[in-house]
Image: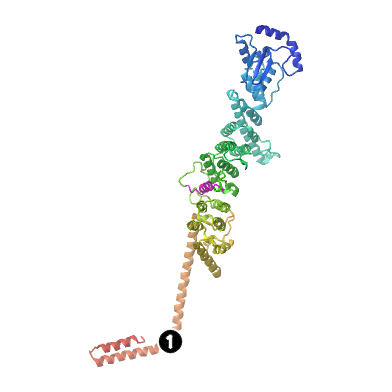
Amino acid sequence: MGLSMEMEVYGKSNNLTSKLLALTNMPISDVSSDLTIEVGASSFALHKFPLVSRSGRIKKLLVDTKDAKISHINLSSIPGGSEAFELAAKFCYGINVEIMLSNVAMLRCASNFLEMTEEFADKNLEARTEAYMKDMVLPNISSSISVLHHCESLLPISEEINLVNRLINAIANNACKEQLTSSLLKLDHNFPSKAMSNVAPETPSDWWGKSLAVLNLSFFQRVILAVKSKGLNQDMISKILINYTHDSLQGLAVRDPHLVKGSMFDLELQRKQRVVVEAMVNLLPTQSRKSPVPMAFLSSLLKTAIASSASTSCKSDLERRIGLQLDQAILEDILIPANSHRNSHTAMYDTDSILRIFSIFLNLDEDEEDPLRDENDTAYDFDSPRSPKQSSILKVSKLLDTYLAEVALDTNLSPLKFIALTELLPDHARVVSDALYRAVDVFLKVHPNMKDTERYRLCKTIDCQKLSQEACSHAAQNERLPVQMAVQVLYFEQIRLRNAMSGGHNPFFFGATNSQFPQRSSSGVGSGAISPRDNYASVRRENRELKLEVARMRMRLTDLEKDHVSMKQEMVGSHPTNKLLKSITRKLRKLNSLFRINNMKAAGSKANSESRFLSHRRWRYSVS
């Protein structure tokens, strides 16, 4: 029987079909089927006419085939599989199919695959799904994200029909519209004459950014790139990245302690971590000291990058980002475990990474310019345009000393690496060296077999003038310290005691009491530690004061000398004894001159050695 005769049979039984369709959701079974369609493991016994009347693909397979008796069709490649075909078949039979967020993407792709267009029937499945997309999906961000998530299992046809790009663009456009609306609401709220009682919070509990966590990494990256290109602000992008990373790495960032290192499962875990971290780093906003990315998030990324053996460029990017805002870090942020592969002889913490991070902050890498540095960033304003502020340096110095005290307990930490850490900061970075001294003392105690040269070099980093009296007392009796340092401590202790006894004060001696370090009201940090430029200005100021004081002393000394001379003259002129002495002196001079005249007459011109000797003796012992 040909296809036309089969259609006539179907037409004669159409009334019965309509009645049965009202009672059941499945195609009728009382009318014998003439077409079997296989979709994967599922098989559907259907009728040709309702399918041909709405599906161009099935019509081509039946009508355009010379074999009129074809009764089996395989549609295993239909997107959505048997579930999608079942809904499409119901639609062909006139059964009401409810289109929802969970199935609209599947039905849209299936309608395209089956060619269920307006060419074959009015209000066909493709038109129905398009209408739902325009009215219910594309205008709403969360709905678009949900449908985009379902597109992941419908590749490649969801890409071919441009469904994925449409959804991503809709998400980006609506996100930027929402941002603009929120900004206008804030502006209206801040305007005095139009104050609003209720303003939506920036990140409500149903915030659409959380919905992005359901997307796979590829689609998520495309969404972020789209919202960036549309102008979504970096704060919002950072929140989205943090939320997505937290959900993606949950259960991956913390390793199972019983997991066998190097096993297949462990390697797969590392691979997943590495892929996520490297993707997130590439999506981070442009790095700068004013980056909206929190320090805790950057630190978590770096720890995961090291643990998962991420690429060198990925770790370097994170280290630079952390270094640029190191003054915002706390100890937990820089306690980065080393990727030791459970080697008992390896250090606990990755000190090499910390060395690079602190060097970046202090701009010790002078040969490497930061291409992404903000030109308007005035936070670096002392020794050079790239030198950090003194207040930031003091925060970082305290952070480093705390870090040193923590890593000093690691018996596997190399002395050379610890010394390199202690030598990082410039001299003006520390107000008091007590914390550094304690860290060094702990390290010496934990590493008793250090070489003398290393011990001396390590202790050399401690400025004894910046030790408190308590620390000096401890250091003077500390047998772990080199003799040179003990002598130096005792020397400065003597100076301290001498100054205390004499009541003197040395402005350059950072000794015992905190009262010697006045607090700055603006920054709340001590002024005892000063940068080279501040130090130079301070020295010039003190030199001027000293010159003025020396000039005053000279004037006073001159006055005192004049007073002393005048007093001496008065005393010599007024005392009776002085008058008598002057009279006797005058008489002796007269007698002496008389004796010389008589001797010259008696001896005549004779001048022998004896007379010269006597004359010489008289001259030597004369009062005049």
Q: Give left or right: position of 60 versus 611.
A: right
Depth order, front residue of 344/102: 344
Q: Is residue 350 magenta?
A: yes
Q: Position of residue 84 (x, y in %)?
A: 66, 22
Q: Quadrant of residue 57?
A: top right
Depth order, front residue of 516/269: 269
Chief secondary structure of the magenta span?
A: helix
Q: Quadrant of residue 246?
A: top right
Residues drawn in magenta = 348-365
Q: Give left or right: position of 94 versus 565.
A: right
Q: Position of residue 106 (x, y in %)?
A: 65, 24
Residue 143 to residue 510: above or below: above
Depth order, front residue of 312/15: 312
The residue lying at 74 percent from left, 16 percent from top is 21
The residue tagged with tag 1: helix, strand or loop? helix
Residue ID for mark 1: 578
Q: Position of residue 599 (x, y in %)?
A: 27, 91
Which quarter of the rendering shows the C terminus?
Answer: bottom left
Residue 523 to residue 150: above or below: below
Residue 5 to residue 560: above or below: above
Residue most toward the left? 605
Which quarter of the rendering shows the N terminus?
Answer: top right
